[in-house]
Image (cartoon, coloured by chain):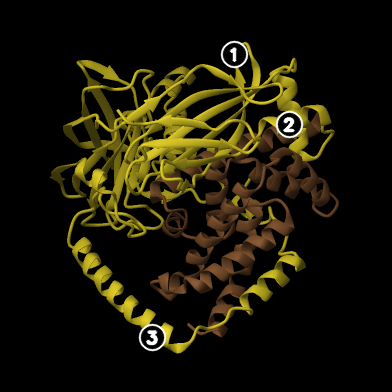
Chain colours: A yellow, B brown
């Protein structure tokens, strides 16, 4: 599948949609001039304030305090930011680990990158380790800006530095047991220099292409900065076994190849406490009846000054096996031979939750539904939601289901 | 911005608005309601648009919020609605195109919206990130996951048809 296939995926704009849009766009009315002038004056003040803020931001390093849409962070967020300001510089890159924030489970690290010569890129490959109470704990990282999961070429071979130096990553502690004391993070960034000419593989990304590129002493990127595919091609060209390929990380594969040379290793260690306000509630009260033939299980609920995350499972009483349910839901989604009985079951287990805080404010989120397999229980519908907390942390959360069942309320005061 | 400018800019973004609404809402009636409401809100809050060059990204954000608001009002019947919608489209759309649209629809919203905005609408990574109010790296990570999910879904689909 290519990007061009995706462009064709949706039908052209239907007439009905066009008519509705046209009618709406042409039905707007301008307000009286006085109100407009007042608004313009107010905007002028706000714009001036924003410009002052932007000017300040332009002269400083990228920070976790910065937001893409200019919206402010809560006071509690700002109180938990740790300034690091560790800078490393060589002939190809200037790198500053600016600051970090940790909410008890999730963390963000801001990294400012500058390239003195965009024609001389460098591959940045991270490792992150965390220790709590003297024991290593599992952490999972995701690129916040830049692919910190498998490393990335900087600047991008196709687009250059679109992010203007603003890089960083977020991550989450995934240990079953939540961290309770201080957590010491050690971030290691390996900087690898390409030894051969770099170009992008384009849209036709076949494995043979990457193997041939390596054999021809060339480096092919994917999407201008990813070397995941190339590292596989290099491993194959080097004659590595499947097992070795699968157990070696991208950066280590590249380091073993002739295509890159390790220039420098940057290491930064910082310690951050688990905030007292962090609340994590898992499997609260086991399972509760949730309407006819349904049971609800609170699988996960955690709240911090950064975000709220929940996973509820709605488990139907059914003797259907997982395979049957999956097959039938797939058929239902594609309109082929849908089984009405199973569809009805899936439908009954698919409810909406309206989330409100102690003041009755509705918290909007990007919730979704997914059919999941439960060990020994067949299948269930998982309702998960994740939302950013922009203001004060809620003290109480109420989840009101759309199927008329009793709302679930959780107090979050410590 | 005059109302004529506003209307012109809205109509220029028509295809983008349709695809975004279509990716979040299955029923055409809902898509029409959402886009009408989004346009009204955009006009009412046009003072919040800081730079006119960001008109489309700003309007798409409002539309996404409107679609979500509408979804929350309804008791969702995702799979039933999907089945009905695909049955309607199946007559007029080639099977391979239907498979791709179905695969896109089956992605979770977190992955679906970046695909629509980046691949279908051609927004830059940074614009996509601004519309979704997430960092650029998150968009990249979601696009990466979406590509993997689409590949798996389409392969499974092909195998099912061949069986």
Task: Answer above or below: position of B36 versus A201.
Answer: below
Labels 2, 1: one chain: yes
Kindly identify which residue carries mark 1.
A375
Is residue B13 among what the camera can see? yes
N-terminal of the pair, mark 2 or mark 1, is 2
Please tell me which residue is depicted at 69% across the width and 55% down the height of the picture: A10
Q: Position of residue B155 (x, y in %)?
A: 68, 34
- Please state which of residues B19 and A196 is positioned toward the viewer in this rendering: B19
| Residue A329, numbered label | 2
N-terminal of the pair, mark 3 or mark 1, is 3
Q: Which of the two discs, 3 and 2, sits closer to the camera?
A: 3
Left or right: residue A347 versus residue A131 is right
Left or right: residue A90 versus residue B136 is left
Please tell me which residue is depicted at 28% across the width and 49% down the height of the picture: A74
Q: Position of residue A199 (x, y in %)?
A: 41, 51
- Please state which of residues A226 and B95 is positioned toward the viewer in this rendering: B95
Q: Label 3 vs label 1: CA separation?
A: 64 Å
């Amino acid at each position: 599948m290519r990007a061009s296939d995706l462009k064709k995926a949706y039908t052209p704009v239907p007439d009905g949609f066009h008519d509705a849009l046209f009618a709406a766009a042409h039905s707007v009315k301008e307000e009286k001039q006085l109100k407009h002038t007042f608004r313009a004056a107010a905007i002028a003040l706000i714009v001036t304030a924003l410009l002052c803020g932007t000017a300040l931001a332009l002269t400083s390093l990228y920070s976790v305090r910065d937001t893409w849409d200019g919206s402010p962070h809560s006071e509690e967020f700002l109180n938990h930011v740790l300034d690091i300001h560790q800078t490393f510089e060589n002939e190809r890159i200037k790198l500053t680990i600016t600051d970090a924030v940790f909410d008890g489970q999730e963390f963000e690290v801001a990294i400012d990158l500058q390239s003195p010569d965009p024609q001389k890129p460098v591959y940045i490959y991270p490792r992150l380790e965390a220790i709590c109470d003297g024991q290593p704990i599992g952490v999972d990282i995701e690129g916040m800006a830049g692919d910190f999961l498998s490393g990335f070429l900087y600047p991008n071979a196709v687009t250059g530095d679109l992010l203007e130096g603003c890089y960083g990553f977020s991550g989450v502690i995934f240990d079953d047991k939540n961290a309770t004391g201080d957590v010491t993070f050690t971030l290691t960034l390996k900087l690898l220099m390409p030894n051969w000419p770099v170009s992008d593989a384009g849209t036709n990304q076949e494995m043979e292409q990457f193997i041939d590129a390596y054999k021809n002493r060339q480096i092919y990127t994917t999407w201008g900065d990813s070397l995941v595919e190339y590292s596989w091609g290099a491993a194959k060209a080097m004659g590595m076994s499947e097992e070795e390929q699968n157990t070696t990380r991208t950066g280590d594969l590249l380091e073993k190849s002739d295509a890159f040379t390790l220039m420098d290793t940057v290491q930064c260690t910082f310690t951050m406490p688990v905030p007292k306000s962090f609340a994590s509630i898992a499997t609260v009260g086991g399972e509760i009846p949730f309407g006819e033939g349904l049971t609800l299980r609170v699988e996960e609920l955690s709240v911090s000054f950064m975000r709220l995350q929940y996973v509820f499972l709605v488990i139907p009483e059914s003797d259907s096996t997982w395979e049957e349910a999956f097959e039938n839901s797939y058929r239902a989604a594609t309109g082929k031979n849908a089984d009405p009985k199973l569809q009805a079951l899936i439908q009954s287990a698919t409810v909406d939750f309206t989330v409100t805080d102690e003041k009755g404010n509705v918290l909007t989120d990007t919730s979704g539904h997914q059919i999941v397999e439960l060990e020994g229980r067949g299948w269930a519908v998982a309702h998960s939601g994740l939302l950013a907390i922009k203001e004060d942390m809620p003290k109480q959360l109420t989840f009101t289901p759309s199927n008329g069942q009793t709302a679930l309320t959780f107090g979050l005061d410590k | 911005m005059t109302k004529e400018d506003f209307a012109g800019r809205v109509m220029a973004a028509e295809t983008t608005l349709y695809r975004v609404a279509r990716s979040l809402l299955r029923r055409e009636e809902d898509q029409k309601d959402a886009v009408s409401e989004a346009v009204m809100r955009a006009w009412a809050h046009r003072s919040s648009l800081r730079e006119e060059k960001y008109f489309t990204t700003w309007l798409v954000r409002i539309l996404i919020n409107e679609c979500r608001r509408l979804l929350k009002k309804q008791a969702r019947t995702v799979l039933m609605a999907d089945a009905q919608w695909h049955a309607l489209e199946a007559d007029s759309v080639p099977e391979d195109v239907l498979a791709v649209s179905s695969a896109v629809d089956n992605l979770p919203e977190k992955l679906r919206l970046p695909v629509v905005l980046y691949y279908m609408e051609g927004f830059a990574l940074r614009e996509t990130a601004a519309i979704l109010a997430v960092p650029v790296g998150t968009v990249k990570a979601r696009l990466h996951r979406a590509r993997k999910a689409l590949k798996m879904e389409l392969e499974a689909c092909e195998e099912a048809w061949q069986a």
